[in-house]
Amino acid sequence: MKINAKFAAALVGALTFSGVAHASIAGPTPPPGETAGLDLASPLPEGVYFVNIGSVGSLRSAKGEGAFDYNVPALVWSTPWNILGGRLTFLGAAPEVSLDSKSSLYARGIYNPLLAGQLRWNLGNGFSASYLAGAYIGITGTNLYAGGNLFVKDPLNETTFYQVLGLAWRHDGWNATANLKYGIVGDNGTSSPLLAAPPKKNADFFIYDLGLTKSLGRWELGVVAYGSTMNSGSYSELRSANFPYACSGCTQFALGGLVGYNFGPVITQLTVATDLYAHSDNNVLGAPWWPQKETRGVLRTIIPLWNPETPKAVAAKY
């Protein structure tokens, strides 16, 4: 099948599941900006697709040198079925994460896998909308270390209920997208030698990923913007100090650019953005929870694995 820029954006938009910024460490479960400039709304052609999403960037939670990187291999199945007029799509991923603040925090391993379903509607006149619901499944085995010592055991042992409202408008090569995400983060089953007790409730989050791009032949160019906010999380006691274990009241806004190219059939897309604003309500022993702004690059590679063959016309013989 022919793959164009519109299809590429719609496909990558289905992959709203590469979350790797844990609420207890750096921010919302999925990283803000992963779908900025992507179409989460337009129905995908029937088929199965492999997508890899890799990202490198700095770390808001660690002042000075630090890195927070992730890689997400994923599968998407756009089914032949419609429900309430919307195309039914299933998706899943098994992300990997690497966090290193150079001087203190360190983590590397498998991140919470995501399983989700989605309905996508073509509303006509270039407008589309979608609704996605799924869950990041809590796992054990990936620990957080500080100064070479165990700081938090199994910080990913929690499940997040995840919802996304996708909106898109396309006309004459212009692509406007808005992806609105809300996550309810479950109770944390973690333990720590430094914390008297784990938090009873992590901070829920809201993310908005925005984009405006223009398709020019095989190229796609444009601007992206994204932001996130987290409500007040619960607190634990750290050596008799009031310690906000979740990123309570964390808010940020970033602006950047997008460039994509269709190699046919393989498609790549790259975004680079930086925070213009980063704030947290709470402090950790007098230091801000988000002490610095983040700059991040995201590279996406899309490979179709299977699409149904177009039925051949059969001429009747008499």
Image (cartoon, rainbow, N blue to C red):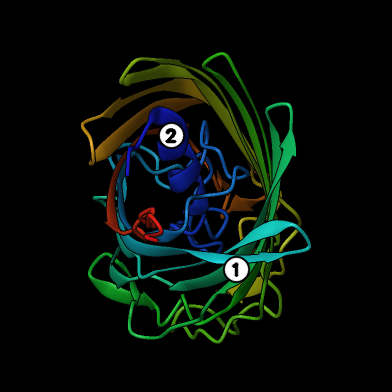
Can residue 32 be seen in the rendering of this structure? yes
- Pick the front one: 29 or 104: 29
Q: Is residue 191 above or below residue 16?
A: below
Q: Residue 10, relative to residue 125: is it above or below?
A: below
Q: Is residue 259 left or right of residue 84?
A: left
**Quarter of the image where one finds residue 123:** top right
Going by the picture, which residue comes out furthest to the front? 318
| Among the two numbered marks 2 and 1 on one chain, the one whose residue lies closer to the N terminus | 1
Give the camera-side residue of 250 and 57: 57
Q: Residue at x 28, y 37 (%)?
A: 267
> Looking at the picture, how far across and down is residue 252, in whole percent?
61, 35
Amino acid type for the residue under numbered disc 2: Glu
Report the quarter where the C terminus lies: bottom left
Residue type indicated by callout 1? Gly
Q: Is residue 27 above or below residue 139?
A: above
**Foreground pick, 154 / 84:** 84
Q: Which residue is mark 2?
A: 294
Picture coordinates of residue 104 (x, y %)? 31, 57
Q: Secondary structure at mark 1?
A: strand
Residue drawn at x 44%, y 73% is: 112
Residues 239 and 99: in front is: 99
205 to the left or right of 29: right
Can residue 281 be spotted in the picture?
no
Give the quadrant of residue 55: top left
Q: Which residue is mark 1?
A: 117
